[in-house]
Image: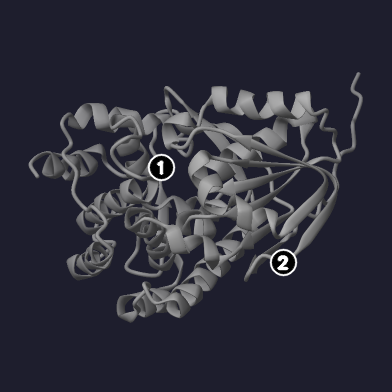
């Protein structure tokens, strides 16, 4: 005997991404702003001049990728319970990608899901991490292995927050912009080659194009069953680098930059990309002082860590490889020898 539960329905998770000065906004509910000490010290007063709520609380968690863990999630949840948040309450993620991911994840599991808003304060989070609803945390096995897809109600991108951004953080964001151009938009890549992203007006245009590119991909594949996985170009290698260095040596975008160079070398070996195209990408990354080299001390250990990647399936590893500039291949049929040869080359760097 069978009992059918008919749950087929269309859920509209659409939302707007506003790229402009923060609007004055009042929320008629309990709201908690989740941030870290650095962002709060620099920008919380500005944010509080723009928003108000029926009840407004500040939750502060430590700054850094190494704190993107269960302990920080518990800090957020405990505060929500203490202040008796309910299903109509809301969180605001106010910080970079780490804050955005953790706030979104906490929102997704608190009373089985409440709303949250993204107000990203780094270039990387503005062009990538805040868009698309990926939330989560790290554990000892790797990056973002625990999480949920939970779309924000809205994303508010204000370039005001970038005025205090350190140069390394700026470069980390540029890496994600370049990633989207290489995988999906050849014309955008050409624009970036001649552009000076240190110019605020030029940067605003680059942010707009990067966000539009990601929005188009997410709209076609919200939960990463296919096309959206292409946005992980550079991440398969980059996540291993972050794991090996305990998330302390490189910013996420810096590790992705190195990962892009490694992926390009694999693509060149497989004749998917020319050496000239790979060099153009490397030169553009180095233009913004991004690292493009890494010492692989143990090729086999590096390779085995790939299997912890969320995109990998059992005994096969999924690689995101550029096909020239402006196109991409998602494949799990790359020969191990090709990958280890590339890693061996980095071991000799």
**Quadrant including the C terminus:** top left
**Mark 1 or mark 2, which has the lower sequence index?**
2
Q: Could you tell me residue 38's position as x and y percent?
A: 48, 44
Dot 1 lies on which element? Answer: loop
**Residue 256 at x, y percent in the picture:** 35, 49
SS assignment at label 2: loop
For the point 50% across and 33% down, the residue is 62
The residue where tag 1 is placed is: 318
Tell me residue 66's x, y (percent): 42, 31
Q: Please, is residue 228 above or below residue 137 in the view?
A: below
Residue 99 found in image quarter: top right
Residue that appears at 89% across and 22% down: 2
From the viewer's perspective, tell me whether residue 210 is left or right of residue 329: right
Real-space CA distance between mark 1 and mark 2, rounded to the nearest whole angstrom: 42 Å
Q: Nearer the viewer, mark 1 or mark 2?
A: 2
Horizontally, residue 135 falls left or right of residue 332, namely right
Residue bearing mark 2: 23
Horizontal side, residue 267 vs residue 213: left or right: left
Residue at the location (31% across, 53% down)? 257
Residue 236 lies, with reference to residue 66, above or below; the image says: below
Residue density around tag 2, few if under 14, some if 14–19, many if 20 or more, within 10 Å = few
């Amino acid at each position: 005997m069978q009992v059918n539960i008919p749950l087929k329905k269309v859920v509209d998770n659409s939302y707007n991404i506003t790229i402009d000065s923060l609007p004055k906004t009042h929320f008629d509910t309990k709201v908690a702003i989740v941030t870290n000490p650095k962002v709060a010290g620099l920008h919380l007063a500005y944010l509080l001049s723009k928003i108000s709520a029926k009840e407004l609380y500040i939750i502060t968690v430590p700054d850094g990728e190494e704190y993107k863990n269960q302990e920080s999630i518990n800090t957020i949840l405990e505060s929500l319970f203490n202040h008796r948040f309910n299903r109509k309450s809301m969180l605001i993620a106010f910080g970079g990608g780490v804050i955005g991911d953790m706030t979104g994840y906490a929102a997704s599991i608190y009373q089985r899901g409440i709303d949250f808003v993204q107000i990203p304060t780094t270039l990387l989070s503005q062009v990538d991490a805040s868009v698309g609803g990926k939330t989560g945390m790290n554990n000892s096995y790797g990056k973002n292995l625990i999480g949920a897809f939970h779309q924000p109600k809205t994303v508010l991108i204000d370039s005001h927050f970038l005025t205090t951004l350190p140069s390394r953080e700026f470069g980390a964001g540029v890496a994600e912009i370049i990633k989207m151009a290489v995988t999906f938009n050849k014309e955008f890549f050409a624009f970036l080659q001649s552009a000076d992203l240190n110019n605020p007006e030029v940067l605003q245009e680059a942010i707009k194009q990067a966000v539009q590119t990601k929005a188009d991909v997410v709209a076609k594949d919200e939960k990463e069953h296919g096309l959206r996985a292409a946005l992980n170009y550079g991440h398969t290698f980059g996540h291993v680098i972050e794991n090996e260095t305990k998330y302390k040596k490189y910013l996420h975008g810096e590790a992705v930059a190195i990962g892009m160079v490694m992926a390009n070398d694999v693509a060149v070996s497989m004749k998917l990309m020319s050496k000239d195209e790979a060099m153009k990408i490397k030169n553009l990354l180095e233009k913004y002082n991004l690292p493009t080299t890494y010492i692989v001390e143990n090729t086999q250990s590096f390779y085995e860590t790939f299997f912890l990647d969320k995109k990998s399936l059992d005994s096969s590893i999924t690689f995101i490889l550029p096909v020239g500039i402006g196109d991409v291949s998602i494949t799990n049929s790359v020969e191990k020898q090709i990958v280890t040869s590339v890693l061996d080359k980095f071991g000799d760097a």
